[in-house]
Amino acid sequence: MKKKAIISVSSKQSDNDEVIEVVTPGDFYKKNDSYYAIYNETKLSGMEGTTTTLKIKNDKFSLIRMGSTNANMDFNKDKKSRTMYKTPYGAVEMKIKTNEIDIDVNENGGKVVINYSMSLAGQIAQDTQLKVNIKTQEGQKTEDRE
């Protein structure tokens, strides 16, 4: 059953004190052995026309963007992944090494904290912390609110 949720995603690079945070309404549900949080990006994020899906398992987290920006970023502890980050301005290769991942999610929402190194197009890797917080609006199905 889909639930309405408030989804907060924040990112902070280790060499910069600035935290980039998006707080947005979305949907949250469980399917098979994974939880999903889905929201639409806004003009403010610079990715208007993109839908972001967060797929959360016990030890794996995926951030999937489809629309004006396309990417599939996978985070697995002590593993490396590679993806193409496609924007309206072109595509760039992105490499990710997950250093730490802490997932605490259940049917009512929860949080994910990931520490990872990311490099774009062969640049020097940046250590980054990604925090996701999902708060469901208890007992309200998507169908009830439409």
Image: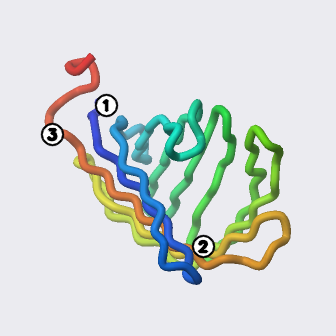
Measuring 36% from the left and 43% from the top, which residue is drawn there? 24
Please state the horizontal and vertical placement of residue 95, each as a whole percent of the image: 74, 66
Name, please, the residue furthest toward the bottom.
Answer: 15
Q: Which mark is residue 2?
A: 1
**Image position of 63 (left or right of 32):** right
Element class at badge 2 = strand
Q: Nearer the viewer, residue 117 or 11?
A: 11
Q: Quadrant of residue 48?
A: top right
Element class at badge 3 = strand
Distance of label 2 from label 3 (alpha carbons): 32 Å
Measuring 35% from the left and 35% from the top, which residue is drawn there? 27
Task: Evaluate if marks 2 and 3 touch, with contact meaning CB atoms under 8 Å apart.
Answer: no
Quadrant location, the C terminus: top left
Task: Evaluate if marks 1 and 3 touch, with contact meaning CB atoms under 8 Å apart.
Answer: no
Quadrant location, the N terminus: top left
Q: Circle 3 sits on which residue?
A: 138
Amino acid type shown at disc 1: Lys
Q: Circle 2 sits on which residue?
A: 98
